[in-house]
Structure formats: structure tokens, C-alpha cells
Image (spheres, helix red, strand yellow):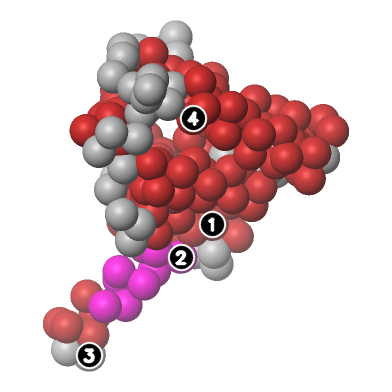
Amino acid sequence: MSAMTATGKGAATRETILARAHEIACCTGLEGISIGPLAQAVGMSKSGVFAHFGSREDLQLAVLEAAAERFGEAVLVPALAEPRGLPRLRAVMRHWLDWVRTNSAGCVLLGSVTEYDDRPGPLREQVLRNERRWRETLGRTAQQAVDCGHLRAGDLEQYVFELYAIPLAVHYEAGLFGAEQARQHGDRAIERWVAAHAPTA
């Protein structure tokens, strides 16, 4: 077997482990990832899993980063095809609500905040990095809408807080009362927010 083939196989195996670990984390949280059951689920030994991830914590960190990448690809990347300003901000929010719908059974990113908000260490630091990175992206998108004259200038940090609150409410309502009702409320909330922050004549 050539070195290139071995490297490709190793990368594929790593992705298989990561994908299964992500599935587990969606249901039981990152703390629910256990190397033994995970190794059994992917048909490997514990040592085989450790060969790709040096520790359980390394695996959890990799799952967190992979979850952030999936979120960005589903929410931000398609929105970037829209013109800067309000069209792009609306697209971000629309795709974010789509993400909530497709991940209503469990979102690693959302769950990680609850799991690690009061637990110092590398996992909490990664959660903070993910959150800050997304909030900065959301803030930058909102600022572009202000710069384009689509929104009234204001407290950008507060804008991000309010926009962030809508998908969170949709996520919780979807689990309790159904995705369709939650989505309708979310769409209306976004349009009410846009109207409330429209430039004054």
C-alpha cells in the first residue's frame, strides 16, 4: 500500500469515527461520547480510535469543531451568495431556521453551551471560540446591512443578541409544539425585527 493510499484511508477512518461521535453527541451531548461504545459502533478497537484521537477530550474537541463547520456550511455559505445588506442577513436567518428544523433532535453547538458554560477547560474554551466567531459573523452581516442603508445604525452587540434569540426560541418551541408552528413564529419575528430597525424616513 502506498503512503498516499494509507493516508487517504486513515483520513476516511477518522471521518467515520468523527461522524459517529457527532451522531452520539446530538443525542446525548459531548459528555455522552464514550470510547468503548464508539469503537464498537465503528467496528474498531479502543486503541484504533485512540490512534486517530489521542484522548476522549481531543475527540470531543474535534466533534465541536466539525459541528461548527457543518453549521457554517449550512447557514453562512449559502447566504454569501446573496447581495450584502438585508438580503444576506435575511438569508442567514432563514438558513439558521432551516438548521433548527433539521437538527431539532439535538444540536451539538447548542448543547455544548449548556454542558460547558460553568466547566473551565479546553472544551469550554472551544465553545467560547465557536460562539464568538459566530457572533462576530452575525454582527458583521448586520453592520453591512446598516452600511447599505437597509437598517438603522444602533448598538450592534444588542442587534446580535436579539437576532440570536429568535432561532433559540424556535429551537425550544419546535421541540415542544412542532416545527411548523415554531418556524412560522420565527419568520414573523425576523420580519418584525427588520421592520423595527428600518431606517427612519
Return the mark for residue 20: 1
Say if mark 2 contacts mark 4, CB within 8 Å: no
Q: Is residue 199 visible?
A: yes
The residue identified by callout 4 is 194
Which numbered disc flags the more N-terminal residue, 2 or 3?
A: 3
Within-10-Å neighbours for mark 1: few <14, some 14–19, many 20+: some
> Residue shown at 38%/22% (left/top)?
201
Say if mark 2 contacts mark 1, CB within 8 Å: yes
Q: Could you say where residue 135 lies in the image, as x and y percent from the top left?
A: 33, 28
Q: Quadrant of the N terminus?
A: bottom left
Residue range highlighted in magenta: 8-16
Instruction: Determine if the magenta segment contains residue 196.
Output: no
> Residue shown at 36%/72% (left/top)?
12
Amino acid type, callout 3: Met
Q: Residue furthest right?
A: 177
User: In front here: 153 or 13?
Assistant: 153
The residue identified by callout 2 is 16
Q: Could you say where residue 71 lies in the image, as x and y percent from the top left?
A: 43, 48
The residue identified by callout 3 is 1
Q: Could you say where residue 151 lies in the image, as x and y percent from the top left?
A: 36, 29
Within-10-Å neighbours for mark 3: few <14, some 14–19, many 20+: few
